[in-house]
Image: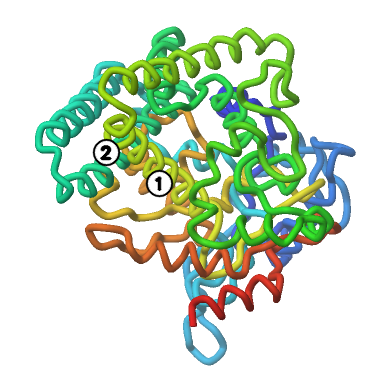
Amino acid sequence: MATWVLSECGLRPLPRLIPKPRTGLLSNNRSSVKLPLGVVNKKIESVGSRDLNQVWFNGAAVSDKRIRSKDWGLKVSVPLQVATLDGEEEEEKVNGFMKNSDFDPSAPPPFGLADIRAAIPKHCWVKNTWKSMSYVLRDVVVVFGLAATAAALNNWIVWPLYWAAQGTMFWALFVLGHDCGHGSFSNNHKLNSVVGHILHSSILVPYNGWRISHRTHHQNHGHVENDESWHPLPEKIYKNLDAATKSLRFTVPFPLLAYPFYLWSRSPGKSGSHYDPNSDLFVPNERKDIITSTACWTAMVALLVGLSCTIGPMQVLKLYGVPYWIFVMWLDFVTYLHHHGHDEKLPWYRGKAWSYLRGGLTTIDRDYGWINNIHHDIGTHVIHHLFPQIPHYNLIEATEAAKPVLGKYYREPKKSGPIPFHLVDTLVESLKKDHYVSDTGDILFYQTDPQIAGTSQEKSA
């Protein structure tokens, strides 16, 4: 089953490794030899691609067939708490780490993807097509209801309220189309494609172009070079940016308006377009998909032009144009904060240090208050990134079930009021300090450009 999950994510299966004991390893003479968990992790990591069927015991390579033959139940004793010489009790451990000690989020986790999957109830994986369609019906009714009400009242007191509400609903439509792209909407590929095209084209997103690049994002999350969305810039690329580009990238509100430009030309250092079937983003057999989604996007633009000629461009701007940009701001706001802005710096990887699991564990859950239900619990992002096949309406339960396995690798989101105003400060602080990563090394953390940070502090003073 774990192999199927990994194949759905587009990855090769990981080698089968034994669960690591919490307090130590055994030698061949049946006596207990305790090694720090970090040492064990490094030993296993050092195997690399030379022999994926071996792990290291006391400095010697041992095949995993021999390991599986060990009777661990008879030879290993793992007390929850151990009395010290002073009579004090040792602190409780969480996944092999002391609960109240310093925790290194870049350390290889003492659990595997299969362990997390096994903790999630089976029913969380079940896709209910009718339930998914009910969310679409709900959101579409609200969208048309808001538009009809605003057009009927046509009051400048009402319009700002309408823009905020309708922009949020456009964002909700995007999330449902996002589920279609992952295949978590239903088991019917054609239904997913039709619904995804309708929802995303209605908010000027090229469905297939986005779907394919977003798949790349999930397959390479946390990788400096290979990730697709909101990945850090290597220092060399960052240093070559002109001052205007740096300012736009790190000064609110400009990063919140980036999405349409990203669709056209991707991020700095990368080339291609989500609308171009010949783009580097796509392989030749995906070109027809790109032509289809670009044609749907073009049809939506033509519809808006036709409406402008019928009801006037100002009315289209008020009913559609302003909510569209509110939606763009929601999208950039949410997607950025799912990968940035934690109180403690989180790692990014490259080379042999990266793995699908380690990259996925750097994502962050967020609480959006009343908006959680409106945008379909997209804030439960860690489990979604690891297992994108889980429908959005099961993500909360799946996350709760996985927490005991994840331990400190899961970061509880700060509780929000009805509206997540606290996350605005989180965004601003991150943009002040998270600017680039080193060109060398395999485990990296964001570095700060003093000039950008100084400029931001002067503006906020």
* Front residue of 352 and 113: 352
The amino acid on which the numbered mark 2 sits, given as a three-letter code, is Gln
Image quarter for residue 285? top right
Residue under pointer 2 = 166
Alpha-carbon neighbours of circle 1 within 10 Å: few (<14), some, or many (≥20)?
A: some
Which residue is drawn at the image coordinates 59% and 51% (left, top)? 74
- Residue 39 lies left or right of residue 110; in this view the side is right
Compared to 35, does 18 lie above or below? above
Quarter of the image with the N terminus is top right
The disc placed on residue 121 is none
Residues at marks 1 and 2 touching, judged by CB atoms closer than 8 Å? no
Residue 209 position, x and y percent, is: 58, 23
* Front residue of 40 and 183: 183
The amino acid on which the numbered mark 1 sits, given as a three-letter code, is Trp
Compared to 85, does 36 lie above or below? above
Alpha-carbon neighbours of circle 2 within 10 Å: few (<14), some, or many (≥20)?
A: many
Compared to 198, does 426 lie above or below? below
- Residue 186 visible, this orientation: no
- Residue 123 lies left or right of residue 50; in this view the side is left
Residue 93 position, x and y percent, is: 51, 67
- Residue 460 lies left or right of residue 240; in this view the side is left
* Front residue of 130 and 203: 203
Which residue is drawn at the image coordinates 85% and 38% (left, top)? 49
Residue 256 position, x and y percent, is: 49, 51
The disc placed on residue 330 is 1
* Front residue of 114 and 448: 448
Task: Tell me the colour scheme of the image.
Answer: rainbow
